Image: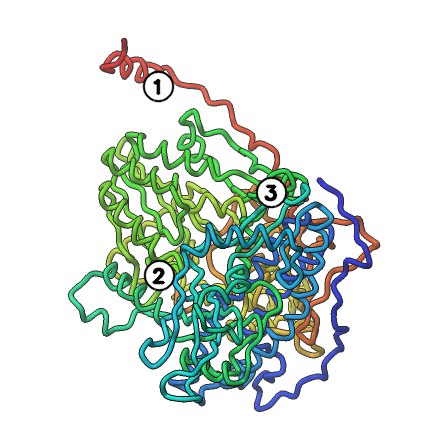
């Protein structure tokens, strides 16, 4: 494991949190001051991502990537969360957040204030990265300080490569303001000369840049130069409007609302669910503007003009001093191959924990449970299992719930192959996986063409479960192999997200899974299961029941214990139960990567509750629930967070981990996360976060530790073929038309 040491200068500057005053309780209700607004807390999470771009222990190009992730996250936040709040402000202006009592309008104002407060940090961290790139021979071109040589080269490339591709537009009485696409940059200028209607008619020019490459590269004196194309067009904008002189010049970028829902009106149309989603995707492209980013000079008159034409309130304008499109942070390493080797993370390949390439998966899994821990272990054993199931004569069906698939998905290929070989393949494909809708629509067509049965989920509930069931019939006996996961069936993200995949032949689990799929095929949600937790009717009630049990054990024998790892927490019922457990003295350890709406360590309420967040090389994504200690300890893993959308508005599945080896592995994960003192952030009673700074312990990065821990093979029992098995194989060989 790579050893990393703390440095005082690397610690982010955090506001020293003070213990808040004990909140007052009214009419038996928990005080609102115990809770935190979901949106503002998410911004705190994204700030922790931003802080990774300032951590000098992280390789330079990876720090640039974290800055790109910060802005990408922010884009989606504005499109979805802020978009939803803007809709709410119009439709239900008096509706208040149940945790803070704020209206949508008040939340929006606070969001923009907090985002603007982070702008200076972004500028500082980006400036530091630029300096280090310069020290490594890479210059991001500063158009306000061009050298003569740089200007000559850029002018030549502009004239030859860029200008022929441009379509400047002049907006006046006869030329309407164009539609601006989401997340694309435009050069906007005001021009000399007034329109025919007189002085008050501002003449504006717009130049789209979306169809251009993001940046140009060239070399001067062995130094690599990178020039952003939008800035290049802005610099030479004076050459684009003939005799008219450019008076003001800026770059614009808008963010549009993307919060679309399947409106019942659409369902009245005579088209299937896939057709409805196609219509909604078209609609999304033209939704209202929720944010306007500006980089450059903008007079009050020009600002008012843009606010009116877009339209967007002035309060939703954000002025930027760094690039507005940070997607270059993901692609730049590819054009700097030599630097990329030394300034990126060292490659860690997922470990092939078990070898199923010899068609031994089903035999092994029929008598052994298996836990796969991504990205430390490879997803290949699961894919091998599907491919083997496609060919195995005892397999009659494969059923799976799909939410997000990788491009060129090997999992989809295995399912299509199984269908082509005559297996019954049922794919419950959720078309409403946000921003993957079109990909899922395309996969639906491919799967159907291969012979798979594809259903699109439920109108009222998203199907977010990660569930796969292989059904076998051998000598008249039905048996199951069931897989329950915390993450998507996606080979790409399995190398980027920490997720768990649990495979078991437990008959009760298999029957539950079969009943779940049967309910979904009927357009229903299952109301009773014997082993699995299944939202929306289960999961939340199961979690609440186990919390109450730990309260009982704490009060009667003093051995209550709760450990939970999720990505988000905002469900009021669960939070109130956790407060009761803490008040009863139950030790509660939570690892919550993102949204957390409950304050820990508040006297009289959450004294026994500790919350930490891990932000590191991989995206923490697994969901783990542990209740109790010793022999009565129960461990569950599954697909849902403790957000109200997961507990009451989605289909989620959890399974108990019963296998001793798998239990030990899950406990090791939680232990490592608890011991992390490099990538861990502690949540304080006031809702802020402080970087773990315990220097009395050996530095430990939980993700790097777990990469080493899981880099060992699963022991395979010796499998001997019986005489009957060998005879069957020999007869199959004799009857093969290609026996040679």
When the figure is inspected, residue 208 is found, relative to residue 499, above or below; the finding is below
Q: Which residue is mark 2?
A: 432
Q: Which residue, as the protein is rendered here, is positioned at the far front?
A: 243
Contact between labelled residues 3 and 1, with CB atoms less than 8 Å apart: no
Q: Quadrant of residue 20?
A: bottom right
**Residue 685 versus residue 85: which sits nearer the camera?**
85
- Mark 2 or mark 3: which comes first in sequence? 3
Q: Position of residue 350 (x, y in %)?
A: 56, 38
Q: Left or right? Give the position of 639 relative to 57.
A: left
Q: Left or right? Give the position of 17 relative to 395.
A: right
Per the model, the C-alpha gap separating discs 2 and 1 is 46 Å
Q: Which mark is residue 725?
A: 1
- Observer-side mark, 2 or 3, equals 3
Q: What residue do we see at 39% from left, 18% from top?
A: 722
Q: Which residue, as the protein is rendered here, is positioned at the far top?
A: 740
Mark 1 crowdedness (10 Å alpha carbons): few <14, some 14-19, many ≥20: few
Q: Quadrant of the N terminus?
A: top right
Mark 3 crowdedness (10 Å alpha carbons): few <14, some 14-19, many ≥20: some
Dot 1 lies on which element?
Answer: helix
Q: What residue do we see at 72% from left, 58% from top?
A: 128
- Mark 1 or mark 3: which comes first in sequence? 3
**Residue 600 versus residue 182: which sits nearer the camera?**
182
Q: What residue do we see at 53% from left, 51% from top?
A: 156
- Observer-side mark, 2 or 1, equals 2
Q: Left or right? Give the position of 494 relative to 310.
A: right
Q: Which residue is mark 3?
A: 336
Q: Position of residue 458 (x, y in %)?
A: 30, 63
Mark 2 crowdedness (10 Å alpha carbons): few <14, some 14-19, many ≥20: many
Per the model, the C-alpha gap separating discs 2 and 3 is 37 Å
């Amino acid at each position: 494991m790579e050893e990393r040491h703390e440095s005082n200068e690397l610690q982010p500057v955090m506001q020293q949190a003070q213990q808040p005053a004990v909140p007052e309780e009214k009419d038996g209700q928990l005080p609102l001051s115990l809770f935190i607004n979901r949106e503002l807390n998410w911004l705190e999470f994204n700030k922790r991502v931003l802080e990774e771009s300032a951590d000098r222990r992280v390789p330079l190009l990876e720090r640039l990537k974290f800055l790109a992730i910060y802005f990408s996250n922010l884009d989606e936040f504005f499109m979805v969360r802020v978009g939803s709040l803007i809709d709410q402000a119009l439709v239900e202006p008096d509706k208040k957040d149940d945790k803070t009592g704020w209206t949508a309008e008040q939340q929006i104002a606070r969001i923009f204030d907090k985002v603007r407060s982070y702008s200076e940090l972004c500028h500082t961290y980006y400036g530091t990265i630029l300096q280090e790139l310069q020290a490594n021979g890479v210059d991001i071109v500063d158009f306000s300080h061009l050298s003569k040589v740089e200007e000559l080269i850029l002018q030549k490339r502009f004239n030859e490569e860029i200008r022929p591709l441009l379509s400047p537009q002049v907006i006046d009485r006869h030329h309407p303001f164009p539609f601006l696409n989401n997340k694309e940059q435009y050069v906007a200028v005001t021009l000399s000369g007034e329109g025919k209607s007189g002085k008050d008619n501002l003449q504006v020019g717009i130049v789209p840049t979306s169809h251009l490459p993001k940046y140009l590269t060239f070399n001067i004196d062995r130094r690599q130069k990178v020039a952003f194309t939008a800035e290049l067009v802005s610099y030479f904008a004076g050459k684009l409007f003939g005799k008219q002189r450019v008076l003001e010049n800026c770059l614009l970028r808008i963010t549009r609302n993307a919060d679309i829902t399947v409106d019942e009106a659409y369902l009245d149309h005579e088209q299937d669910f896939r057709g409805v989603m196609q219509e909604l995707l078209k609609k999304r492209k033209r939704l209202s503007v929720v944010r306007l980013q500006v980089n450059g000079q903008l007079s009050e008159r020009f600002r008012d003009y843009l606010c009116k034409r877009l339209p967007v309130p002035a309060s939703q304008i954000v002025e930027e001093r760094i690039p507005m499109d940070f997607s270059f942070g993901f692609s730049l390493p590819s054009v700097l191959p030599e630097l990329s080797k030394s300034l990126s993370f060292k490659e860690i390949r997922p470990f092939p924990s078990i070898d199923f390439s010899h068609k031994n998966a089903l035999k092994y899994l029929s008598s052994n449970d298996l836990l796969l821990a991504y990205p430390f272990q490879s997803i290949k054993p699961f894919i091998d299992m599907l491919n083997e199931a496609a060919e195995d004569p005892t397999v009659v069906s494969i059923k799976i719930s799909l939410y997000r698939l990788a491009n060129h998905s090997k999992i989809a290929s295995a399912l299509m192959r199984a269908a082509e070989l005559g297996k019954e393949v049922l794919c419950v494909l959720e078309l409403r996986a946000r921003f993957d809708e079109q990909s899922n629509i395309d996969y639906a067509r491919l799967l159907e063409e291969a012979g798979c049965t594809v259903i699109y989920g439920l109108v009222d509930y998203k199907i977010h479960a990660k569930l796969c069931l292989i059904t076998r019939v051998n000598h008249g006996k039905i048996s199951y192999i069931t897989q329950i996961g915390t993450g998507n069936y996606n080979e790409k993200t399995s190398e980027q997200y920490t997720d768990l995949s649990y495979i078991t032949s437990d008959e009760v689990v298999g029957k539950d899974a079969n009943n779940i799929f049967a309910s979904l095929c009927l357009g229903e949600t299952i109301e009773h299961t014997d082993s699995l937790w299944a939202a929306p009717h289960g999961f939340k009630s199961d979690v609440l029941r186990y919390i109450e049990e730990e309260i009982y054990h704490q009060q009667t024998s003093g051995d209550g214990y709760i450990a939970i790892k999720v990505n988000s927490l905002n469900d009021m019922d669960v939070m109130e139960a956790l407060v009761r457990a803490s008040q009863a003295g139950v030790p509660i350890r939570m690892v919550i990567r993102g949204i957390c709406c409950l304050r820990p360590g508040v006297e009289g309420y959450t004294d026994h509750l500790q919350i930490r967040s891990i932000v590191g090389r991989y995206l923490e994504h697994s969901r783990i629930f542990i209740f109790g200690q010793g022999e009565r300890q129960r461990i569950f893993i599954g697909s849902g967070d403790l957000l109200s959308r997961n507990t009451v508005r989605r289909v989620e599945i959890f399974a108990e981990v019963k296998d001793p080896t798998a239990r030990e592995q899950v406990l090791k994960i939680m232990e490592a996360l608890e011991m992390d003192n490099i990538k861990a952030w502690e949540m304080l009673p006031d809702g802020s976060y402080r970087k773990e700074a315990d220097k009395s312990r050996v530095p430990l990065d939980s993700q790097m530790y777990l990469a080493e821990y899981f880099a060992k093979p699963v022991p395979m029992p010796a499998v001997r073929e019986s005489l009957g098995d060998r005879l069957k194989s020999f007869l199959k060989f004799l009857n093969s038309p290609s026996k040679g």
